Structures are given as structure tokens and as C-alpha cells.
Image: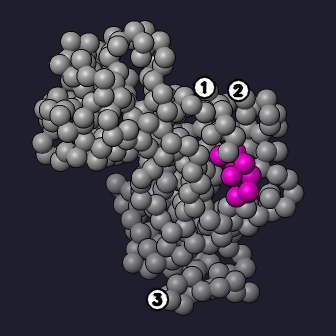
């Protein structure tokens, strides 16, 4: 029995004795490049994975990998077949999601949510308790990461949705549902010359003083765009891995930075001022266009916006009043 051609290059049909588990094993070997790491990722023993891979190759009549002491490398035929196997597994995931949608609602199941690192620690504590009370059967499994990594996991069905900050490029297979706008504020040492201004003109910030997060953080790009500064003209000796690291450097008197509203807190040794241009980033939920719970995602997006409210637009009132 043939389910379909695996590739145009290799006119091979899926034999009836092939299993999805075998395809999963083969894709894991390509991703992790060794049998042992692939077996660990699949939570099986190495002999079990090797046996499943051998049966797959026998069913297809094709050698998928070249084995050697350092690992396993796909053959040209194997590479083409594995590319198509990814499409097969993606279709299986979509089938499972459609079946789940038919049997229950999104708020009656677990959802795997990705959150960017400049948002997760500041947004999730504000919203998760309320979401739990409103949807008691709804379980969120949260993963933090960089935007591109999270979108890749979303595209490969390892995540169901991603909370990210726009603008950021996404593929045509991804739908983006906007939640709220979050204003950006200038954080500086109390003795910085700009601290005497009520509103900061961003083009007056010395590029040598501007602190940025590592490449891959969307806030880095948002900051450069808001300040109209080229990366080559900024400080080379600082590569912040987190907003908390950047905040500590600002408090120590070693530069200025742009901080989203939800990250601000009163009582710290950082002076905060509003930019005259009021730059912002748009927080949104990204999902696959094929995801069957799109209406529920929009409901969740609206509820998140309701929970955040004005906090996304303003600095803490106590901090604003104490620094005037």
C-alpha cells in the first residue's frame, strides 16, 4: 500500500510496514547527528532507535545515513527523504491538533507557550494567576527563549503559541494576533545630564553611552530603530544577556538604555524618563495558521490586554514622582 511519494527525486512510496515512530527516529538522528543523542531525545534506548532506523531503511530500500565513529550523516537520498518526512510529521501534528479541537476547547487542555526573555519574567506573573482562576482546566507549559528560536519551535509544532514583540519578521505560515502596545522608557543613572529633562529626545543620547542586549533580542533592534542609531556606532564592550544585567549596569553609572514599561519598578537606583517620541513595541501572540484554536487564542489575547491595562503605558507612579 502506498500512502504517497516521499520525494520527486526519489519516487518512493511509504510501505505499509513503515511507522511514524521510525520517521521520528530518523529525523532525530539528522537533528542530533549521533545515535546516542537522538535516542536520548526520543527517550528510548540506543539499540531500539538503531533497530527502528534499520527497519525503516529496509522498508524504503534506501540507506538514509552514513555511519562513522563521529556520528551519522544523511546520504543524498536520505536527505531528500528526510525533508519529506518532516512534512509528513507536520501533517500528523496538524491532524492531532484538529482532533483535539473537535473533542475539547483550548481552555480544557495544555498549551505549550513560548515567551521572549524580555517579556516572560515581567508579564507572566501579572497574568498567570488570573488566567488560572478564569480557566481552571487550562494548563500552560512555558518556554523562554529568543524570538527566532521560539518561532522555529512554533513552526515545527514544538510550541502552540509564542508571545513576542513586534515588529519582527514572521513566515507566511504564522498568524499574529496583537495583544497590547508596551511603551519604552529611558533608564539612566541619577547623575546623568539627561536626568534633568522631563522628556528625552532620543537623538540626544550619545551612542557610546547606549547599552544594548545581545543580537537575537528583539529589544535590541527596537532600541536601535527608536534612537535611529547604527549598531556599528554603539558601545562595543557591553553585550547584555538580560534586561536585569543591563539594569545593573545603568544603576552602576555605566550607560543608558531603553526599558519596556512592564520591566520598570519603583525603588531601584535608576532614573526613568519618557522619550519625547513615545516609542513602543507591540506584544502579540503568534500561532500557526493551521492551529485549530485560533478563536480561543484571540480570546486569550484580549484577556491578556485587559489584565495588563495601563501598566504597559506608564512608568511606576512612585518612581515618576520621586525623580521629578
Q: Which one is closest to the eye, mark 3 or mark 1?
A: 1
Mark 3 and mark 1: span between their CA atoms? 51 Å
Residue topped by disc 1? 125
Q: Which numbered disc covers residue 129?
A: 2
Quadrant that contains the N terminus: bottom right
- Helix, strand or loop for disc 3: loop
Where residue 100 appears, as percent x and y from the top left, is: 80, 57
Residue at image coords 72%, 48%:
299
Where residue 201 appears, as percent x and y from the top left, is: 24, 35
- Helix, strand or loop for disc 2: helix
Residue at image coords 55%, 48%:
284
Task: Give 240 or 41, whichever is nearer the viewer.
Answer: 240
Residue topped by disc 3? 9
Residue at image coords 25%, 22%:
197
Q: Residues within 10 Å of mark 1 (few under 14, many from 20)?
A: few
Considering every residue shown, the one lying at the far right of the view is 103
Where residue 7 appears, as percent x and y from the top left, is: 52, 84
Magenta: main secondary structure equals helix
Task: Give 50 or 112, whichever is nearer the viewer.
Answer: 112
Q: Is residue 114 left or right of residue 321?
A: right
Do tag 2 and tag 1 residues touch (Cβ < 8 Å)?
yes
What residue range appears in magenta?
294-301
297 within the magenta span: yes
Where residue 115 appears, as percent x and y from the top left, is: 53, 41
Quadrant that contains the C terminus: top left
Label total for image? 3
Do tag 3 and tag 2 residues touch (Cβ < 8 Å)?
no
191 within the magenta span: no
Mark 2 and mark 1: span between their CA atoms? 7 Å
Residue at image coords 54%, 28%:
311
Amino acid at each position: 500500500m502506498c500512502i504517497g511519494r516521499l520525494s520527486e527525486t526519489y519516487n518512493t512510496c511509504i510501505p505499509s510496514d513503515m511507522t511514524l515512530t521510525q520517521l521520528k527516529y530518523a529525523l532525530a538522528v539528522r537533528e542530533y547527528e549521533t545515535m546516542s543523542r537522538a535516542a536520548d531525545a526520543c527517550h528510548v534506548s540506543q539499540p531500539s532507535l538503531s533497530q527502528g532506523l534499520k527497519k525503516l531503511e529496509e522498508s524504503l530500500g534506501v540507506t538514509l545515513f552514513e555511519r562513522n565513529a563521529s556520528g551519522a550523516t544523511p546520504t543524498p537520498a536520505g536527505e531528500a527523504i528526510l525533508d519529506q518526512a518532516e512534512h509528513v510529521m507536520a501533517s500528523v501534528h496538524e491532524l492531532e491538533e484538529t482532533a483535539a479541537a473537535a473533542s475539547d476547547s483550548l481552555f480544557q487542555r495544555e498549551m505549550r507557550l513560548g515567551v521572549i526573555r524580555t517579556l516572560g519574567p515581567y508579564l507572566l506573573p501579572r497574568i498567570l494567576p488570573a488566567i488560572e482562576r478564569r480557566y481552571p482546566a487550562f494548563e500552560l507549559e512555558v518556554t523562554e527563549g529568543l524570538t527566532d528560536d521560539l518561532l522555529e519551535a512554533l513552526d515545527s509544532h514544538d510550541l502552540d503559541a509564542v508571545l513576542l514583540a513586534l515588529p519582527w519578521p514572521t513566515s507566511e505560515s504564522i498568524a499574529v494576533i496583537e495583544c497590547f502596545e508596551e511603551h519604552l522608557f529611558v533608564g539612566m543613572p541619577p547623575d546623568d545630564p539627561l536626568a534633568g529633562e522631563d522628556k528625552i529626545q532620543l537623538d540626544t543620547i550619545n551612542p557610546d553611552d547606549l547599552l544594548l542586549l545581545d543580537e537575537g533580542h528583539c529589544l535590541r533592534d527596537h532600541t536601535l530603530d527608536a534612537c535611529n542609531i547604527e549598531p556599528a556606532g554603539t558601545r562595543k564592550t557591553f553585550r547584555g544577556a538580560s534586561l536585569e544585567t543591563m539594569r545593573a549596569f545603568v544603576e552602576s553609572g555605566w550607560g543608558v538604555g531603553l526599558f519596556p514599561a512592564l520591566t520598570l519598578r519603583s525603588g531601584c537606583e535608576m532614573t526613568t524618563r519618557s522619550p519625547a517620541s513615545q516609542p513602543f513595541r507591540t506584544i502579540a501572540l503568534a500561532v500557526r495558521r493551521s492551529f485549530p484554536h485560533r478563536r480561543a487564542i484571540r480570546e486569550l489575547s484580549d484577556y491578556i490586554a485587559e489584565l495588563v491595562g495601563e501598566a504597559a503605558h506608564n512608568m511606576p507612579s512612585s518612581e515618576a514622582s520621586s525623580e521629578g
